[in-house]
Image (tube, rainbow, N blue to C red):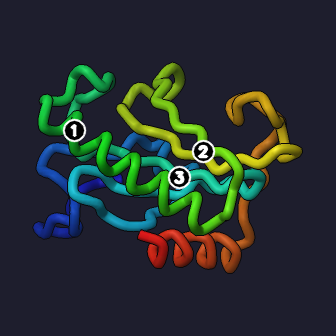
């Protein structure tokens, strides 16, 4: 994803920031937060959101400034609460791994006992099942409403 259309910056993007191509391919834009772009993973097995801090070259939480660390924590909590409200899930999993995609991003996943892979992690379990476009749109609208 580039941050420009012609000479204009896209809303919410920061100068010099480029979204990793794998995150761009595997997820859908939901909205811009203060620090992060919020995206929905295109895997219908779990309601799954990703926050990507709009800072170029950042791979680790400790690479962020203290103010950005606080903002990321605030936005992660805000998104987790909204996801819980929107899905009525029994558990929220949050993680920033970065072993495959190095660009710093935080996963927030709604989980329920008996879902695909329970109680294990969502990573590496089975094959991704993309949403129908209408279902993905409905999910992202529910998240926007909850936020």
Give me the C-alpha separation between circle 3 and circle 2. Answer: 11 Å
Quadrant containing the C terminus is bottom left
In this figure, which residue is indicated by the disc labeled 3? 49
Q: Comparing marks 3 and 2, which lies closer to the viewer? A: 2
Q: In this view, does 120 lie above or below 35?
A: above
Could you say where residue 116 lies in the image, as x and y percent from the top left?
84, 43
Nearest the viewer among 99 and 63 is: 63
Q: Residue 38: which quarter of the image?
A: bottom left
Nearest the viewer among 51 and 130 is: 51
Tell me the SS state at disc 2: strand
Give me the C-alpha separation between circle 1 and circle 3. Answer: 19 Å
Who's the residue at 33% across and 51% down the image? Answer: 75
Quick check: marks 1 and 2 in contact, CB under 8 Å? no
Quick check: marks 3 and 2 in contact, CB under 8 Å? no
Q: Comparing marks 1 and 3, which lies closer to the viewer? A: 1
Tell me the SS state at disc 1: helix
Quick check: marks 1 and 3 in contact, CB under 8 Å? no
In this figure, which residue is indicated by the disc labeled 1? 70
Decide which of tag 3 and tag 2 comes sooner along the chain: 3
Could you say where residue 10 lies in the image, as x and y percent from the top left?
22, 66
Who's the residue at 12% across and 50% down the image? Answer: 15
Could you say where residue 74 lies in the image, as x and y percent from the top left?
30, 47
Decide which of tag 1 and tag 3 comes sooner along the chain: 3
Nearest the viewer among 96 and 25 is: 96
> Callout 1 environment at 10 Å: few (<14), some (14 to 19), or many (20+)?
few
Q: Is residue 66 above or below residue 73?
A: above
Who's the residue at 47% across and 51% down the image? Answer: 24
Nearest the viewer among 54 and 35 is: 35
Who's the residue at 22% across and 44% down the image? Answer: 71
In this figure, which residue is indicated by the disc labeled 2? 92
């Amino acid at each position: 994803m580039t941050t420009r259309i012609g000479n204009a910056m896209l809303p919410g993007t920061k100068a010099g920031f480029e979204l990793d191509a794998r995150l761009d391919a595997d997820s859908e834009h939901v909205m811009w937060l203060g620090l992060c772009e919020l995206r929905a993973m295109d895997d219908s097995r779990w309601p799954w959101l990703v926050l990507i801090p709009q800072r170029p070259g950042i791979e680790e939480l400790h690479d962020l400034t203290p103010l950005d660390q606080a903002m990321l924590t605030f936005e992660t909590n805000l998104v987790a609460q909204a996801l819980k409200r929107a899905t009525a899930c029994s558990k929220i999993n949050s993680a920033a791994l970065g072993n495959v995609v190095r660009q710093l991003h935080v996963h927030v996943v709604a989980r329920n006992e008996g879902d695909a892979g329970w109680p294990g992690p969502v990573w590496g379990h089975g094959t991704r099942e993309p949403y129908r476009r209408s279902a993905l749109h409905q999910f992202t609208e529910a998240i926007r409403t909850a936020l």
